[in-house]
Image: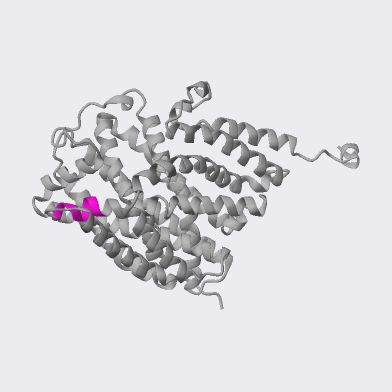
Amino acid sequence: MKKSLKATDILALGFMTFAFFLGAGNIIFPPQAGQQAGDHLLSAMLGFLSTGVTLPLVAIIAVAVAGGWKGMTRDLPSKVATFLAVMIFIVIGPAFAAPRAGLVAYEMGVKPFITDAGQLSLTLFSIAFFAIAMFLSRSRGSLIDLVGKVLTPILFLALIVLAVAVVVNPQDAIEAAKGDYVDMPFIKGFVEGYNTLDAVAALLFGMVIVDTVRDKGVTDEAETRKYLIMAGLIAAAGLAFVYVSLFYLGATSVNIAANATNGGDILAIYVAALFGPAGQAILSLIVLLACLTTVVGLISACADYFSTLTRWSYEKWVVVLSVICCVVANVGLNQLIILSLPALFALYPIAMALVFLTFIRRWLPNPTLSYRVVMLVALSFSMIDAAKVAGFDVSAFRVIPLFDYGMAWLMPTSIALVITYFVGAKAPSQQESQTA
């Protein structure tokens, strides 16, 4: 008998996916973008949503279509596919994103309540934070129940309260746009949404969602694919709701948060103005839950994949990764950010190329050739963007289209795909030529 999920489980699965994506960075960035977009708010939002929401959704669907990472990389050499996956998991997991989320949770969620905050308070918080993340990550079968049915509804409710308060009681009038948002608001928003890099995380979270569905007893591939896509759609709707409300918050914060240096400051000032002394508690709840659920998703994804490569069990990898994240959040995080960001910018175009190839594979005359050439070109040109992030002078490559937007890889990769489509096409046989 074919097992299926109940409506409540599907909704919880979508909430879980939404929570995995919604980290502190996703909450902090839109207010600053909205403040700069000003009266060009709508165009900037549409640009941001087209990449900040659409790309992660497309990546989730690609995982569903291919049936997982192995399906997506079947036309690549197995060692190359494994190396690529390991690099993505390390960079987006214990080396960067997960420890950073823990640090942001401390800085915005706990530190404001501590009088003499220092290294000891950070260490104690990190131990507690990653211990909770480890507990939530250990049982894959209960991820839907713990994250999707408990933590995320609380997070989403807090965000709804904030969104309603912003709409009902905006703190400022919307003023003129600033900077690049004056002349090209859509493009600026498009690029900023692209730079969230959530599409890479989508490849990781997609695998976790597949395993979570299977742990619920669903074994049919078509059903699993359907639930994965449904979860992606629910998550995309949730992300869009959050981004739109936070963009509007930023657009109506020009005077009240005029001296703010980043989106976190804008959000903190605005929430304090709306809710008074209780504002910090509401903001802390949002940030802590957003960071915690994202870390749970990252640890679960990394542990799940690494357990397939080694003799260590999933549970053992959860413990190891949680300890590593805790240590990194306390020691040398700034240095790791410096090292990890270039690696992430180098890997992101490869992930995007892989997602696109997954959708058009059936029409490629020679998938093996297309995959290998296109991925190699994407990697080669992504190194330019990585070098720029690392601080190297790569101005000589400014002639490449979209260089200034951190997408120097896009045009060469597209050209490589077109070339391999025609070069890789099989020549018609003599019989086919005579028939024609």
Horizontal arrangement in the rendering, residue 344 relative to residue 290 (left or right): right
Quadrant into which the N terminus falls: bottom right
Horizontal arrangement in the rendering, residue 245 relative to residue 89 (left or right): left
Residue 178 position by quadrant: top left
Q: How many marks?
A: 0
Seen in the picture, residue 184 relative to 283 is either above or below; the reply is above
The residue shown at (52%, 62%) is 306
Q: Which residues, given as a range, are shown in magenta?
A: 106-113
Q: Main secondary structure of the magenta part?
A: helix
Q: Position of residue 218 (x, y in %)?
A: 52, 71
Horizontal arrangement in the rendering, residue 24 relative to residue 216 (left or right): left
Seen in the picture, residue 138 relative to 267 is either above or below; the reply is below
Q: Is residue 107 magenta?
A: yes
Residue 255 position by quadrant: top left
Q: Position of residue 398 (x, y in %)?
A: 49, 22
Give the camera-side residue of 222 and 190: 190
